[in-house]
Image: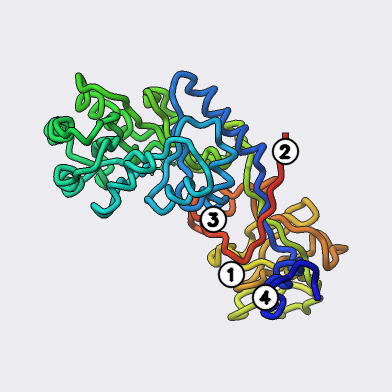
Amino acid sequence: MIAGSSSSATGVSAAQAIVGRATRVTIDLGALRHNLSVARVIAPRAKIMAAIKANGYGHGLERVATALQGADALGVACINEALALRMAGIEAPITLLEGFFQANEIPLLQAYHFEAVVHEASQVEALERSHYGPVRVWIKVDTGMHRLGFAPGATRGIWRRLNALEGVEVVGFMTHLACADDQTDPATPRQLALFEETVQGLPGERAIANSAGVLGWPESHVEWIRPGVMLYGISPFLEGRGPEAKLRPVMTLHSELIAVNHIPKGGAVGYGGTWRAPETLPVGVVAVGYGDGYPRHAPAGTPVLLNGKPVPLIGRVSMDMITVDLRGQPHARAGDPVVLWGEGLPAELIAERAGTIAYELLCGVTQRVRCEEVTSD
Ligand SMILES: *Cc1c(COP(=O)(O)O)cnc(C)c1O
């Protein structure tokens, strides 16, 4: 009988107690706090709404909220995320970045002190019909991204309607930048000018900058900034890398070598036999795959850190395993440590190779991957 295992009959707690497969992520809370301080230093007069939606960009919602107590507010995508934070005892101001989806969320906004972004006429109508309040809202203006928000010409009218409601307090105005990741794109100055013109003379606070705005567009630093991905140590810029902006990676995905095989010249490796050995060579098998969130589209040649040095991925990524060319490390053995991204290997690089963005890699680490908190200083 395993000590303390009340559900040993199902084997559940025994399974959780056994370490087994080495595949895990470490989440560096020291790096998270450091990255928040980078945002503070860059925009010293702005209040920070830290974007922690999608389970804290895959790092753990509560964990990230607790580590980011230095932020002035937290931004989430929906009320379920906001309620989970309150249930965990998080008292910071929380903003629902897409507001409420159903009118029956309105009493919860009031009860739990959530601020809601209002971006659509149906939300205004729901507030007009509601008997709950006070509810604090931000008005979202579409300055060119053409996703969420009121047209600039409609914004004043929306403000008047909301401002007339007893149960509604308009905190201010926000907009979202579509192309700030490209520092040469003229769309950003156009969006900034249109926002300025739209909200001119209206009372309240303003919020514009995502991470790319924070790091690349000082004109977008107004009363509030809304950094997300930079807090996790990732550069928001095209071809950028976190360390260039003094950011430190928060998530590192680790595994280990579980087999070393010698493949004869011409031997095909992996599903579909897409990769063939150009000579007799050692091939390593690493315990990580798309079932853990490693991107299936990562092509041959994508770097994998083995014993701290890069070796190239070969063959297709499978659900639980990948294969690597060990010609550069012929003495590698089963049990040697592997890093897939994070410390020493930017997630941005792996994402580029796999035709995606680091945001998607971070959010996509799956449930079965163990998570360990670490704190560097
Ligand atoms: C997610 C989000 C952010 C943060 O974006 P990053 O690119 O991760 O910095 C900012 N504002 C809104 C409205 C968001 O949804």
- In the image, is residue 146 above or below residue 322? above
| Residue type at the position of mark 1 | Gly
Comparing labels 1 and 4, the label whose residue is closer to the camera: 1
Residue 323 drawn above or below residue 112: below
Which image quadrant is residue 131 in?
top left
Frontmost of labels 3 and 2 is: 2
- The residue singled out by tag 1 in the image is 291
> Residue 273 has which mark?
none
Task: Tell me the residue at 29%/47% (across/down).
Answer: 107
Q: Which three-letter amino acid code belongs to the residue tagged 3?
A: Leu
- In the displayed structure, would residue 276 be above or below residue 344? below
Ligand 1's quadrant is: top left
- Mark 1 to mark 2 CA distance (whole Å): 29 Å
The verdict on label 3 being within 8 Å of ligand 1 is: no
The amino acid pointed to by label 2 is: Ser
Tag 2 residue: 376
